[in-house]
Image: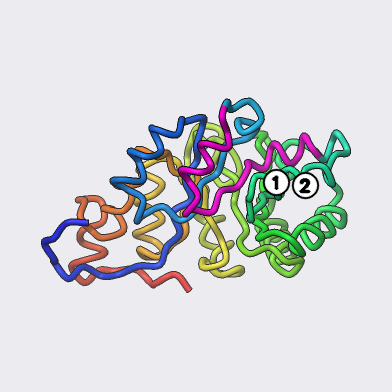
Amino acid sequence: MSGFDLGLPQHVGLTHVIDKGLGPRAWEDILDVAGDHISIVKLGWGTSYVTGNLERKLAVLRDKPVVVGGTFFEVVYAKGRLDDYKRWLSELGLTHVEISDGTIDIPREQKLELIADFARDFTVLAEVGSKDSSVEYSVSEWTRWLSDELAAGAWKVITEAREGGTAGIFDSSGGMRTELIEEIASAVGPANIVFEAPTKAAQAWFVKTFGPSVNLGNIPPDEVIPLETLRLGLRGDTLKEVLLGNEPATAR
């Protein structure tokens, strides 16, 4: 952090970073310059399964919560290896787990039972939304499922967008379903949700709409510092809203 203090507003927004296979030395560099702004690291989809020297990488990330991507959970579920998965996570020293059903069909009641089961031993992030861009859920489905998963024991619920912003709360062309997002936030509460927002335009919209403390996910490692400048109003996209009196409602 710069030694020059502008007295900028503080925020409590989570920055959930997606890792696609960076090595230990790359993470050492990222943590040196951006570590203060990283809340949680997700090892995207099944990358953890094919990463060499995973233990060394996790040792570098030891001060950050690390979670394996939800797609890998779905593979484990399909293979019937949930107990083995729990043991593996524990052996790796991981305390967080992501549970999703964006590709594999998991019956609703069973997903809620899985969340409750894993929540006994792990901090659960539960993801809602399909990775198929042709599938669009109604507002009532989104809000009911997100609320149910929080009630089942999830710490936070994640709204699907994929790493490119082409599904879930985005349409197939990358456009944001803004009315849907605002209704979801109103019903569930922004503080309970991690909105996947892999693009700068999406990140700026979320900060302007819900305030600097909005929780944002699927942030690429090289976008952590740019996102922090959006949160603090140090970028033209959000300067007026955050610093000059046109600030949106704070996430609650």
For label 1, the residue is 91
Where is residue 50 shown, x and y percent of the image?
63, 25
Compared with 214, 138 (above or below) is above
Asked which secondary structure carries label 2, the reply is helix
Q: Closest to the observer: 227 or 77?
A: 77
**Magenta-colored stretch includes residue 127:** no
> Is disc 1 in contact with disc 2, using a CB cutoff of under 8 Å?
yes
Disc 2 residue type? Arg
Write down the residue under mark 2: 87
Q: Is residue 130 left or right of residue 241?
A: right
Binning the other alpha carbons within 10 Å of mark 1 as few (below 14), some (14 to 19) or many (20 upward) gives few
The amino acid type, in three-letter code, at marker 1 is: Glu
- What residue do we see at 72% from left, 63% from top? 144
- Point out residue 158 in the picture as x, y percentages from the top left corner: 60, 53
Q: Is residue 67 magenta?
A: yes
Instruction: Identify the colour scheme used.
Output: rainbow
Nearer to me, 53 or 183: 53
